[in-house]
Structure formats: C-alpha cells, structure tokens
Image (tube, helix red, strand yellow):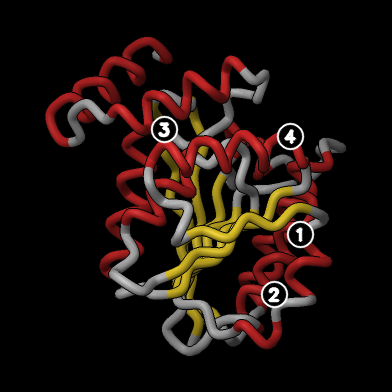
C-alpha cells in the first residue's frame, strides 16, 4: 500500500501544487547536510499554508524547525508585516534552515531560535499572543508544548500537532516507546482541557500512516 499512497500524493501534488524550486532546493540541501527526511510532505505543507491563511494568522509559532521546510510553507501564509518564530534544538539544523529561508526569500519574516523548546517557550511571555501554532518536535513533550501554546495564544488560536497516530501505535497502552507514551499523554491532556476544542485526523501518504491534531483555543 505504501507505494500506492506515495503515488496518490504525487498525483495530488502534481495537480494542485506544481513545481516549487525553493522547496525542492530546501529538501535537497537538507539531504546534503545530513538532516533526517522527516519533514512534512508537500501536500501536508500546503495544508498548513491554507490553515494558517484561513486562521488569518499574523503571528505564527513553530516548535521544531528541522531544515525549515514547514517553516517556508507557514511563512508564505503570512500577510505583509506578519512574523514567525520557530524553535530548534539542534544548531546545525537551524543553520541549514537559515540558508533555506534565505534561498526562499523569507528571512525577514522568520526568527529561528536555537535551544530547548521548553526554555524558549517559557521566555516568550511578552511576545504573546500567537495566532497559529505548529508543533512538530520531540513527542515526549507534546502535552507541555500544547499547554504553552494555549498560554501564548488567545481565544481562536489554531494549534496543529503532527505525528499523533504513529502507524496505529497510539492505541497501544502497553507500549514502552517514549514517543507513543508522550502521544497518549497528549490525548489525555486534550480530552481533559476545557480551553481547547480538538480533533485528530488519520492520514496516509508519502510519509506513511500517521495523523495530526487540530485544535482551537476557546
């Protein structure tokens, strides 16, 4: 099935996205610099772009930059005067992302900050509120990142959390995989949080079987 999922993604991208030199260069540079190929797919990137535009986002927060592929999609959704802050643990990844953003002509809209995301988020109180938050970092900390997204958001802020199905592993209550344990903790947190309206969607495609959380701050 994986090959067919990839073929359908390729068909959708060919029909609805078209060629994009900046994004293709970004993925090529990421590979050349040794970054893991765990970026969102092209179709998922376009979804993030559209959701951010639909939310009317002027201030975007991203947790987990990697090489800046999703960052480029989100920054493109910003209006004139909009800005994006993205947090990345690894200095090398941040350097690669900076180069990719320069190639894409988006450095003026994006502020890359290097270090543990929990520390970066704790220091951002004076920069709130953000209109749109995309979380794609260490899964063990997802519930904390969502709590921080609520704190740094406002009523109406959109929150997206990637990789929450994990090929069905999310339903394995006996798993000792810390990413699955963290994801299950996220769902527990979402189910009990009166500040959020949330759902999760399973996806299949170029990145396999996974899914994302879509939430809105009340």
Of circles 4 and 2, the one toward us is 4
Of circles 1 and 2, the one toward us is 1
What label sits on residue 41 in the rendered view? 3
Q: CA distance from mark 2 to mark 3?
A: 26 Å
- Tag 1 residue: 117
Q: Which mark is first along the chain, 3 or 4?
A: 3
- Tag 2 residue: 147
Q: Which mark is first along the chain, 1 or 3?
A: 3
Q: Residue at x 32, y 37 (%)?
A: 43
- In the figure, 198 relative to 19: above or below? below
- Residue 148 horizontal/vertical position (percent): 69, 75
Q: Quadrant of residue 150?
A: bottom right
Q: Residue furthest left?
A: 15
Q: Quadrant of residue 94?
A: top right
- Residue 46 horizontal/vertical position (percent): 31, 45
Q: Which mark is first along the chain, 2 or 4?
A: 4
**Circles 4 and 2: CB distance less than 8 Å?**
no
- Residue 18 horizontal/vertical position (percent): 18, 29
Q: CA distance from mark 4 to mark 2?
A: 27 Å
How many numbered marks does the figure carry? Answer: 4
In this orientation, which residue lies closer to the viewer: 55 or 8?
55
Q: Residue at x 64, y 20 (%)?
A: 33
Left/right of residue 12 with respect to residue 24 in the rendered view: left
What label sits on residue 92 in the rendered view? 4
- Residue 160 horizontal/vertical position (percent): 50, 60
Left/right of residue 191 with respect to residue 29 in the rendered view: right
- In the figure, 138 relative to 132: above or below? above
- In the figure, 131 relative to 66: above or below? below
Left/right of residue 182 with respect to residue 153 in the rendered view: right
Crowd band around label 1 with a 10 angstrom C-alpha radius: few (<14), some (14–19), many (20+): many
């Amino acid at each position: 099935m994986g090959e067919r999922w990839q073929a359908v993604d390729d068909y959708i991208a060919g029909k609805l996205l078209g060629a994009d030199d900046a994004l293709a260069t970004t993925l090529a540079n990421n590979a050349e610099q040794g970054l893991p190929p765990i970026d969102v797919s092209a179709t998922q990137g376009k979804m993030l772009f559209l959701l951010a535009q639909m939310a009317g986002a002027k201030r975007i927060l991203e947790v987990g930059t990697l090489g800046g592929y999703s960052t480029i999609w989100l920054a493109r959704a910003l209006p004139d005067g909009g800005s994006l802050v993205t947090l990345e643990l690894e200095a090398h990844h941040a350097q690669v992302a900076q180069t990719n953003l320069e190639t894409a002509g988006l450095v003026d809209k994006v502020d890359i900050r290097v270090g543990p995301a929990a520390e970066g988020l704790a220091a951002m109180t004076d920069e709130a509120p953000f209109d749109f938050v995309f979380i794609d970092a260490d899964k063990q900390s997802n519930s904390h990142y969502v709590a921080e997204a609520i704190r740094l958001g406002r009523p109406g802020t959109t929150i997206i959390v990637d990789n929450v199905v994990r090929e069905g592993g999310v339903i394995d209550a006996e798993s000792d995989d810390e990413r699955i344990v963290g994801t299950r903790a996220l769902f527990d947190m979402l189910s009990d949080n009166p500040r959020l309206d949330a759902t999760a969607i399973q996806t299949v495609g170029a990145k396999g079987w996974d899914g994302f959380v879509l939430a809105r701050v009340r």
